[in-house]
Image (cartoon, rainbow, N blue to C red):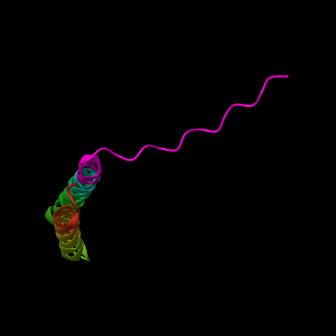
Amino acid sequence: MSDPLPPPLPPSPPAEGQSYALVAQACAMAVQDAVAYLRNVETVANAVIGVAQERLLAGADGDTLKTIATAQETVSAAVRTLEEVSAAATKILLEFPRN
């Protein structure tokens, strides 16, 4: 029977400045995700608005204008989300120690 493997070594402490770089990368990825979210929301909202406008041209009324307004508000909410994520990332980077 073979001997069991030795336990893994503990992780070494990050090199000077490496922690800040990792935090900066995480913040950048969070902002990228928020941008992708905004892009996807805009795509869906544009499709919804297009269908609603087609219905308006066809003579349907009902809640079509409300649907357009809701789609536009959804995009505005996604913009606010991007602003909030960007502000949080900026705050984290400004407050995180660089050494």
Q: Nearer the viewer, residue 48 or 95?
A: 95
Residue located 16% across and 64% down the image: 94
Q: In which quadrant is the N terminus drawn?
A: top right
Q: Residue furthest right?
A: 1
**Can you give x and y, in whole percent of width and height, for residue 80 in the image?**
18, 70
**Can you give x and y, in whole percent of width and height, for residue 61 in the image?**
21, 74
Residue 39 part of the magenta-drawn span = no
Task: Identify the image quadrant of residue 79.
Answer: bottom left
Residue located 24% across and 71% down the image: 67
Residue located 20% across and 70% down the image: 84
Residue 14 part of the magenta-drawn span = yes
Q: Main secondary structure of the magenta part?
A: loop
Residue 59 in view: no
Residue located 16% across and 62% down the image: 53
Q: Nearer the viewer, residue 28 or 97?
A: 97
In the rendered view, would you say 83 is above or below 42?
Answer: below
Q: Nearer the viewer, residue 30 or 82?
A: 30
**Can you give x and y, in whole percent of width and height, for residue 54 in the image?**
18, 59
Residue 47 in view: yes
Task: Identify the image quadrant of residue 59.
Answer: bottom left
In the rendered view, would you say 93 is above or below 63?
Answer: above
In the rendered view, would you say 6 is above or below 65?
Answer: above
Q: Which stretch did the figure color magenta?
A: 1-25
**Can you give x and y, in whole percent of width and height, for residue 89 in the image?**
21, 62
- In the figure, is residue 4 to the left or right of 12? right
Q: Nearer the viewer, residue 23 or 73?
A: 23
